[in-house]
């Protein structure tokens, strides 16, 4: 990941759209294997999983300063009624950090993504 520390936007530091696509694909793989959050993801159809994955890629690209417009619902709208627990939230964030570590993202980039994830917690956890 060349220039990952010197690029100006988080989007660039994540490797642009290609890096985000690979990161989200790995995160979804980890979610499916996760003992805590996995059952929620395993219950989705392949089509629903692909649709959710595409929206997460779009959300992350747009929110990290990329040349993408997010066209999905807000985090609050998406997660209301899902009864996501704090334990599920932490499990999902752990998967995000594991994927980023596996992909050798520098610590400052991981910390920035972690901060963003936790800034959304109140919009996601409803149990």
Image (cartoon, rainbow, N blue to C red):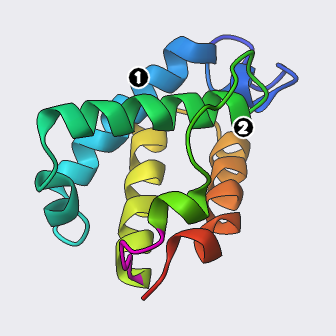
State how far apart marks 2 and 1 are (Cα): 17 Å
Give the residue number, with chain letter if any, for mark 2.
63
- The image quadrant of residue 108 is top right
Give the image location of residue 20, x and y in percent.
52, 25
| SS at badge 1 | helix
Residue drawn at x 48%, y 82% as measured from the top left = 126
Q: Nearer the viewer, residue 67 or 105?
A: 67
- The quarter of the rendered structure image containing the N terminus is top right
Q: Is residue 109 shown to the viewer in this render? A: yes
Give the image location of residue 56, x and y in percent.
48, 38
- Residue 22's label in the rendered image is 1
Give the image location of residue 69, x and y in percent.
70, 24
| SS at badge 2 | helix
Q: Is residue 103 shown to the viewer in this render? A: no
Q: Nearer the viewer, mark 2 or mark 1?
A: 2
Q: Main secondary structure of the magenta part?
A: loop
Q: What stretch of residues is rendered in magenta? A: 80-85
Q: Nearer the viewer, residue 51 or 98?
A: 51
Taking 90 as reference, is 97 above or below it? above
Determine whether, in the image, residue 42 is placed left or right of residue 64: left
Determine whether, in the image, residue 5 is placed left or right of residue 58: right
Mark 2 neighbour class, 10 Å CA radius: few under 14, some 14 to 19, many 20 or more: some
Residue drawn at x 58%, y 58% as measured from the top left = 75
């Amino acid at each position: 990941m060349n220039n990952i520390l010197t690029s100006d936007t988080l989007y660039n530091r994540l490797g642009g759209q290609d890096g985000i696509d690979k990161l989200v694909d790995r995160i979804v793989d980890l979610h499916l294997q996760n003992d805590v959050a996995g059952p929620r993801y395993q219950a989705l159809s392949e089509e629903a999983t692909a649709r959710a994955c595409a929206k997460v890629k779009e959300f992350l690209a747009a929110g990290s300063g990329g040349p993408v417009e997010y066209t999905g619902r807000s985090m609050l709208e998406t997660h209301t009624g899902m009864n996501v627990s704090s334990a599920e939230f932490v499990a999902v964030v752990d998967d995000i950090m594991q994927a980023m570590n596996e992909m050798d993202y520098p610590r400052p980039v991981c910390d920035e993504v972690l901060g963003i994830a936790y800034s959304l917690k109140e919009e996601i956890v409803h149990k």
